[in-house]
Every structure is written in C-alpha cells, then in structure tokens.
Image (spheres, coloured by chain):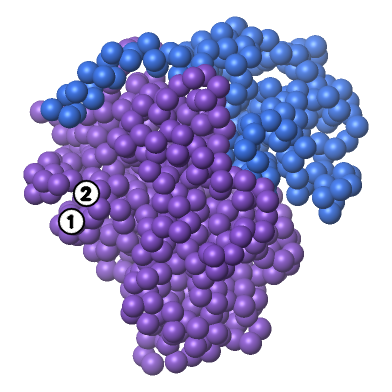
C-alpha cells in the first residue's frame, strides 16, 4: 500500500448528505474480478447523461475541478453496502482524501485499507471549505497526516483526529495482514483453547 | 461481578490480542463468502502465496449475480458468468465449501447461513456484505466487511477491530394486526436516521422482540445497517434453539451447546452507551417515500413536504428525493400507484414471509397494470413453499415464481426496473437506481407488497382485517 503523509491538491465538492455506495459505484460495475479500473464508473449515474456525455449539472464535472485530489462532501458519506469497489473507484478517479462531517463505518474502514484518508470535520468547518472552494476556482488544501492539519494558502487551518493505529498504518503504508501474522502464535493458542 | 451486555460477552471471549492504543485482534468463527466481494481477496492471497487458514470455517455461495430463471440455461452476461466461475475456481483451489448453483442448498448467503446451522449463538460471523447483520438474530456478533478484510479473515481467521459502542433498542407492547417485523425496523430507522447507529452494535430487546419468530428477528437485524449500525443482535432463547436443532452444521452435542448459549443474554443492569424505547402498539404499516430507508411514513399518512424538516440537510434530501421519486408533497400514500412488485431479498424472502404474502394473495388477482414476482431466498425455501402449494397460489394470482437469489434487491442480474417504474419491494434499500437506473423503490413488508400487487397502489392492510 502507498503511504500517505502529505497531500496538496485541488478540492472538488459533492453537496449532498447520505451519499450511498450505490451512487459512488452502481451495481452493474461490481462484476469485474479486478481491483483496478473502477474510476471510470465513479458516480456513474450522476456524472453521465445516458452513460456517455458528461452531465453539465453535476458540480464535479466543471473544468475548474479537473485534477482534484480531495473530495469534500456532507454527512454520512458512504452509507449502504460494504463494497470496497466504492473506495477503489474514488482512488482510481484520483482522490486520496475525502472530507466530510461523518462517514458510514464500513466505508470509513475500507478507505484506510486502500491508502486513502477520510477526514472528519465539524459541520461548520466543512461549510467553510464549501464556501471558499466555490469562491475560488482551483482552490487547494494541504493535508498533513503527520501533524493532523488541513491548511490553505488563504489562511484556513483546521486540526483533525485519526485513530493512532490507523494513522500509523497509513503513514507507513503497512499491510494489516502482515501485522496480524506477527501474532500467529497467539492465534494458534486461541484456537487450541477454543477446541479444548 | 459487573453485569455485561451480550455484545461484551461475545467480544471478550473472542479477543486474541489486545494492547493499549491499538484495535483488538478478534477471532472470527464463521466466514461467509459470495461471488461479488471475494475475487480480489482470493487473487491477493494467491499473489502473496498465502492460504486460507481455516477453510472448514469458510462457506461460499453465489447469490448476487445469479439469474432467477431456469438454472439449466447458461448465464447470458459473460462478466457475471466469469465472476461466478471465478468463485468456483477459488473455492476448489483453496478448499472452501461451496453451495453452487445446482446445489439444493444454494440461496442468498444470509438465508442459507441460518438454514445450514452455520450461524450460531455466541459466534463471531463476517461476510463481505453489509447485510451480515442478519445473523445477529441468533445472538451472534455478525457484521459486514470490505474485500481487504475478507482477505484478512481468509489469511488469518482474525480481524483488527475497534471496539464499537453499544445501543439498546427496547421494543415493548403488542404489535397491532398488519404491523410486521419490517414495520418495526423501518420505524426504528425512521426515528434514528440512516446514520443514527454509526459506530454501534444494536441489541434489540423487549417483549415485542421476544414475541417475534426467529425469521422475523432476522428481518429486524438485517436492516440494522440501514440505520448505520455495525451489527444488530437479539438474545437467543428457546425459539432460537429449536430453530437450530438438527441443522446440518449445528453442534453434534446440541444440549451442551444450548447450556452454553443460555449464558449469552445481557445481564440485568448491564450498561449500554445509548438506549431507545419504542412502543410497538403505536406502530403502523410503513412505506418509504424517499431514497433512503429513513425516509419512511405510515401507510395512512401523506408524502411529506421538504418544509416539514427542520434540519437543512434533511430538507435538501427530501427535495431531491421527491423529485427522483416523482412524488408531490401532500399526496396520500394510498394514492401512489405501482407498476412492479418484488417479494424477495435477504430481508423478506423466507418461508414465513412467503406464507404471509400467499395468505393475502389467495383467491385474488394481481392488478392488470402490475408485474409482480416472488423470488424465494434459497432453494430450501423454494422447495418448502412448493410443498405447501404457495407457488400455485402466487402463480394463479398472476405472480411470477422464480429461482432463488438476490435478484431485484440490487439488480445485478437481469431483474431490474425500467427508468421511472415504481416498485413496492420487500427489500432493504430504496437508494436512487438501486433496482435499476431511474427505478423508484418503496420499501414495505411482504403483506403490504402483496396488497399493492393486487390493488395496483399502496393500501393499508389493516382495512382487510374485518373481511
């Protein structure tokens, strides 16, 4: 997994609460057996008109957001199914950080497994980002996972919290399975106890 | 000794390793696998030269992609066919038990787990599917995971987990005629919202929950995730034990297991992080009007107006939902017509669901403007229903009677809505496009779905009581 330490990039907006995983990646694209190539299907029914042309009414499609690495959205992002295709599609599209007032549990967890940082901020902080992004085309934020800060050139500065273990894994690009296998002896002991 | 919740007892008995500042390493007793969320996990195992640690604790079936038409015909969609074939290859290579398409035990993973006795009280059970919360109905700690975690469980039989919070929902009182398990859980989600249970494991308790059958309890626990909860659970009792006795994978020394299981229920006075009380006697049959399961009202009320919502997020959601759903605020729910009816899904496709719907349908005809289908949750459910003659009742009324699978709950197979079509569905999600792009889904109980099929619009099933 690619480590995540710092990221500076253009911020795009998705101004809806309760965005579910069926919207992030519709079911017809879950049939592939690969982990890659899902970015083209991200927000498919919203991004495209009839599956071909970009929908001009979908804010993310505006030219000013081209190359965005950071997605800012509203509460309870990623609710619904456990499909990891949701973070896969966001990551493949180019996002490495998602900012929202809250996230659904399974989605939140799945982000970390894919080198993506979900940042939880207060509702009013998220609102400030929305306003600044809308005022300034090409608006960028600098995310620092070491200091746990978000800063902008126009003086915005927020601190955020990430659980210590998750932060450690993301900073170092660590693979969970490798870590767990260090406890192989304890797992075997547990199995012996359970069988006895 | 400090009184403990059922969640705490199960959690604490499954901790393999713990240290401050880190998530706990939890042992997983049962792992269910389906074709959609597993191929990338098996592929990663292969690439890293790892094996499945406990293949005998891992059970697989295909359900999401499978056609519900005749099984002897080949699968038309080549990508679906490849995904199904990949599961076969993976199960063979890694030694995992598979209930294949031609198996008499095939079905929706959350229907067959309990049928096979794979789901048991006190176990930790996971699956790469958010509706894994269903299995909590047996007093198991059961939750959905992503594909990376599927791989983690395959390789280590463990998961790294933050300890969730506990949330007690007590449902008391006598539930009136026409109010089903589905109405209880929809009412709860309407109350707490789709993010209300985030970070929590919900325990459902109270006399109205005790009075539910095991299958009804599965309906309640199934939709815990729709309220944002990690898991839902219900204490096991005599109903649970008699459901499980004699099942294929139930413990050989069943009585000894029952004795152990009796110590699982939460101790009197155990502390929960949060509590909510619901009076079942005040509930009505529910119909969702919007595009998430929390956007729900009683069948005898009207489509709400965005102005009814104080929270600006809720207001904005309502505006968008009404537009997508093609509904006008203030319309009586019973004036909303449907073109499609779907009875099925891991929420409501078990034998009791089908009996309830069939009982209503018997001697009546599906409205000429409605296309209605019944998709049993598993091959055993289908067989049982056919032995009881339920298939004939449905077919005579004009329903289509299908093979088992997830079907139109998410429309990964050919069973989908056309744009603009409105459906009364016994499934669990009414998200935009869930049942097909532009499709409009209203979540209801099986009896409410059956009534909508007959009348061609939503009806308050309570009005049939005197007939």
Q: Nearer the viewer, residue B17 or A118?
A: B17
> Chain A is shown in which shade?
blue
In the displayed structure, A74 sits above or below B159; it is below
Q: Nearer the viewer, residue B158 or A98?
A: B158
Q: Nearer the viewer, residue B82 or A89?
A: B82
**What chain is colored purple?**
B
Label 1 and label 2: CA atoms lie apart by 7 Å
- For the residue carrying disc 2, how many other residues have a C-alpha within 10 Å: few (<14), some (14-19), or many (20+)? some
Q: In the rendering, at what x and y percent does residue B117 appear?
A: 27, 51
Quadrant in which residue B270 is drawn: top left
Q: In the rendering, at what x and y percent does residue A67 appear?
A: 83, 24
Q: Are marks 1 and 2 in contact (CB under 8 Å)?
A: yes
Callout 1: residue from which chain? B
For residue B250, the mark is 2
For numbered disc 1, what is the local secondary structure? loop
Residue drawn at x 23%, y 25% is: A191
Callout 2: residue from which chain? B
For residue B245, the mark is 1
Residue drawn at x 28%, y 13% is: A185
Residue drawn at x 39%, y 20% is: B23
Position of B308 with respect to B326 (left or right) is: left
Position of B230 with respect to A171 (left or right) is: left
């Amino acid at each position: 997994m690619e480590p995540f330490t710092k990221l500076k990039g253009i911020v795009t907006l998705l101004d809806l609460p309760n965005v579910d995983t069926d919207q992030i990646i519709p079911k017809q694209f879950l049939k592939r057996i690969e982990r890659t190539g899902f970015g083209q299907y991200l927000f498919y029914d919203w991004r495209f008109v009839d599956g071909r042309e970009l929908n001009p009414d979908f804010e993310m499609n505006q030219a000013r957001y081209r190359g965005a690495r950071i997605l800012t959205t509203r509460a309870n992002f990623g609710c619904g199914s456990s499909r990891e295709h949701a973070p896969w599609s966001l990551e493949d599209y180019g996002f490495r950080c998602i900012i929202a007032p809250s996230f659904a549990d399974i989605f939140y967890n799945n982000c970390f497994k894919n080198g993506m940082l979900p940042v939880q901020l207060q509702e009013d902080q998220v609102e400030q980002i929305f306003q600044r992004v809308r005022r300034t085309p090409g608006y960028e934020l600098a995310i620092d996972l070491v200091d746990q800060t978000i800063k902008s050139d126009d003086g915005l500065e927020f601190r955020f919290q990430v659980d210590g273990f998750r932060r450690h894994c993301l900073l170092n690009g660590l693979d969970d399975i490798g870590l767990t296998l260090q406890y192989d002896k304890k797992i075997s002991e547990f199995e012996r106890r359970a069988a006895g | 000794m400090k009184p403990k919740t059922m969640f705490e007892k199960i959690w604490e008995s499954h901790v393999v390793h713990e240290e401050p500042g880190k998530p706990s390493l939890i042992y997983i007793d049962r792992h269910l696998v389906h074709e959609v969320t597993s191929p990338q996990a098996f592929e990663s195992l292969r690439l890293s030269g790892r094996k499945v640690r406990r293949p005998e604790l891992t059970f697989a079936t295909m359900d999401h992609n499978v056609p519900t038409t005749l099984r002897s015909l080949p699968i038309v969609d080549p990508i679906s066919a490849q995904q199904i074939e990949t599961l076969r290859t993976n199960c063979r290579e890694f030694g995992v038990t598979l209930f294949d398409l031609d198996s008499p035990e095939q079905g929706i993973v959350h229907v067959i787990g309990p049928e096979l006795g794979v789901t048991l009280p006190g176990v930790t059970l996971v699956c790469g599917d958010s509706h894994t919360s269903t299995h909590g109905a047996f007093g198991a700690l059961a939750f959905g995971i992503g594909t990376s975690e599927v791989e983690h469980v395959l390789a280590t039989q463990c998961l790294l987990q933050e300890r969730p919070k506990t949330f007690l929902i007590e449902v008391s009182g006598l539930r009136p005629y026409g109010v089903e398990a589905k109405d209880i859980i929809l009412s709860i989600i309407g109350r707490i919202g789709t993010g209300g249970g985030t970070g929590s494991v919900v325990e459902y308790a109270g006399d109205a929950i005790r009075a539910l059958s095991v299958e009804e309890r599965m309906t309640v626990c199934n939709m815990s995730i729709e309220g944002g909860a990690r898991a839902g659970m219900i204490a096991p009792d005599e109903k649970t034990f008699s459901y499980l006795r004699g099942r294929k994978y139930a413990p050989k020394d069943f009585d000894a297991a029952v004795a152990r299981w009796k110590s699982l229920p939460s101790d009197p006075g155990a502390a929960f992080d949060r509590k909510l009380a619901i009076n079942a006697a005040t509930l009505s049959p529910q119909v969702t009007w919007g595009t998430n399961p929390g956007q729900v009202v009683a069948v005898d009320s009207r489509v709400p107006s965005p102005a009814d919502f104080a929270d600006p997020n809720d207001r904005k959601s309502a505006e968008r939902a009404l537009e997508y759903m093609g509904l006008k605020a203030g319309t009586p729910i019973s004036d909303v017509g449907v073109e499609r009816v779907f009875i099925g899904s891991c929420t409501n496709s078990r034998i009791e669901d089908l009996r309830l719907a069939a009982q209503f349908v018997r001697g009546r005809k599906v409205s000429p403007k409605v296309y209605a289908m019944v998709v049993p949750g598993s091959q055993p459910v289908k067989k049982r229903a056919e032995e009881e003659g339920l298939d004939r009742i449905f077919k005579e009324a004009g329903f289509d009677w299908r093979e088992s699978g997830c079907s139109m709950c998410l429309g990964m197979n050919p069973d989908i809505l056309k744009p603009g079509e409105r459906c009364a569905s016994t499934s669990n999600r009414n998200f935009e496009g869930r049942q097909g792009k532009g499709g409009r889904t209203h979540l209801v109980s099986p009896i409410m779905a059956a009534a909508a099929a007959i009348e061609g619009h939503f009806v308050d099933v309570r009005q049939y009581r005197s007939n």
